[in-house]
Image: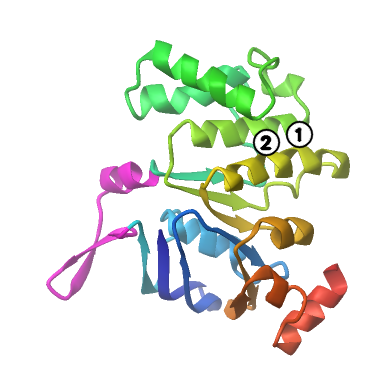
Amino acid sequence: MLKASAVCKSFGAVEVLRAISLEVAAGEVACLIGPSGSGKSTFLRCINHLEKIDGGQMWVDGDRVGYRLVGNKLHELKEREIALRRASIGMVFQQFNLFPHRTALENVTEGPIIVKGVRRQQAVEEGRALLERVGLGNKMHNYPSQLSGGQQQRVAIARALAMKPELMLFDEPTSALDPELVGEVLDVMKDLAESGMTMVVVTHEMGFAREVADTVHFLSEGVLVESGAPSKVLSDPDHARTQSFLAKVL
């Protein structure tokens, strides 16, 4: 579902990603871990071309991200083509980014109606089902200001799912939540994983990574230091840098 080959990204003179190569199979959950500033969120944003890569290549479901190869030259896709491809990739951010003047249900149905042209009645039916799925069937007509942080993040997950993505990206989805609200969001993500959704998750929740991930990738200073099964990377890492990081967070 996802293939990255020697992906590089710089902001000015700062190298944020240094030749990152990894693959995520369909139905797999991959967790990206590492210290702040290691490039995890930037890599996630490169997957749907919110950030343009400076080197290497990336594919989602066989389609090259952001570019088309013509002869031996890469040409950046037009914004409309990028947007169409991006519609198949759901993304949940640290901040919930809900429309404050829309109810939970309206936040969920807006994308399918406007972007995909889904009939309003169908979008509402599917939106209701998604809010039920994330445990918010009784909050459909509440506005974001009337919801807790955990509830808002679950609406954000339902909103992403409403676009029927092939791949879901989560950028530290629990980092802005009070500790007692983290579990309700992680439970929804576990349910998604069990349903077979392909997920790439940037997280500091090592318990979640250990329980749910198929693969864990440790990044430090823009370098992919170590990858493997959670049981290996989190319990018996090979690299001293991984060992040092985990000693501080576990």
The residue at 40%/72% (across/down) is: 54
Could you say which is closer to the camera, residue 120 or residue 125?
125
Residue 165 occupies which quadrant of the picture? top left
Dot 2: element? helix
Q: Is residue 107 visible?
A: no
Q: Tell me if residue 66 is in the magenta stretch.
A: yes
Q: Residue at x 86, y 73 (%)?
A: 248
Q: Quadrant of residue 115 in the image? A: top left
The percent coordinates of residue 131 (x first, y second) are 61, 24
Dot 1, how many residues are within 10 Å of its Cα: few (below 14), some (14-19), or many (20+)? Answer: many
Q: Residue 92: horizontal and vertical position, in percent?
A: 58, 44
Residue under pointer 2: 153
Label 1 element class: helix
* Label 1 close to label 2 by CB (< 8 Å): yes
Judge left or right: residue 249 versus residue 220. right
Residue at (62% x, 28% y) in the render: 133
| Magenta stretch encompasses residue 72 | yes
- Expressed as whole percent of the image width and height from the top left, the position of residue 247 reads 85, 76
Q: Is residue 188 above or below residue 75?
A: above
Check disc 1 and report the residue beneath it: 149
Task: For residue 182, say whether it is visible.
Answer: yes
Region of the chain picked out in magenta, as a range:
62-86
Q: Quadrant of the N terminus?
A: bottom left
Q: Look at label 2 and name its amino acid.
A: Gln
Toward the left, the furthest residue is 71
Task: Between residue 179 and residue 131, name the one nearer to us.
Answer: 131
Question: Looking at the figure, which quarter contains the C terminus?
Answer: bottom right
